[in-house]
Amino acid sequence: MELKDLVGEHELSGVEISTVKVKQYGDYYEDTEVIMFVIDGKTYKATEDPDDGYRSYLKELEVTEEKVANSFPPQKVVGKMKKNSTYDVNDTIQFIDAVTEKIVLEVGTDNTDDYYPYCVLYWNPENLAINAGK
């Protein structure tokens, strides 16, 4: 599945961020970040590839049957691919709250054309309309 498949209007109803151990080479395990989020009732799991400790990437985005620990009433969001700038190329989707127009969730890889790309797994629940003023 590709990030651009999630562009458009959706309902976000759950997010969970965790750290898991992933087998790398031989018997070596490394901590890596994982974010699961629920869009339109379907749970997606995004896993970081920590690469070499200096660079990281979004390893994969997959649909999962796992349940998220943090669920809430569905919130309208709009998925947009993050714009590139003069200095970097991004492969990141941003979910923007339809009411507050603030970014609540970002998933992908920024700075893809540079020597030091980095995985983006960003969750900011304060920007959801349901949390406004709290």
Image: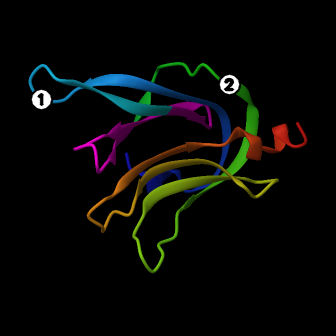
- Classify 11 as above or below 87: above
Q: Residue at x 46, y 21 (%)?
A: 65
* Residue 1 among those drawn in magenta: no
Magenta highlight: main SS:
strand
Q: Quadrant of residue 42?
A: top right
- Classify 116 as above or below 129: below
* Residue 41 among those drawn in magenta: yes
Along the viewing direction, whichever of 67 and 105 lies nearer the viewer: 105
Residue 60's mark? none
Q: Amino acid at mark 2?
A: Ser
Residue with the mark numbered 2 = 71
Q: Residue at x 60, y 19 (%)?
A: 69
Bounds of the magenta segment:
36-61
- Is 17 on the left-hand or right-hand side of 21? right
Along the viewing direction, whichever of 23 and 10 lies nearer the viewer: 23
Image position, residue 131 (x, y; %): 83, 38
Residue with the mark numbered 1 = 25
Residue projecting furthest to the front: 54
Q: Secondary structure at mark 2?
A: strand
Image position, residue 98 (x, y; %): 76, 54
Q: Is residue 44 visible?
A: no
Image position, residue 30 (x, y; %): 27, 27
Q: Are marks 1 and 2 in contact (CB under 8 Å)?
A: no
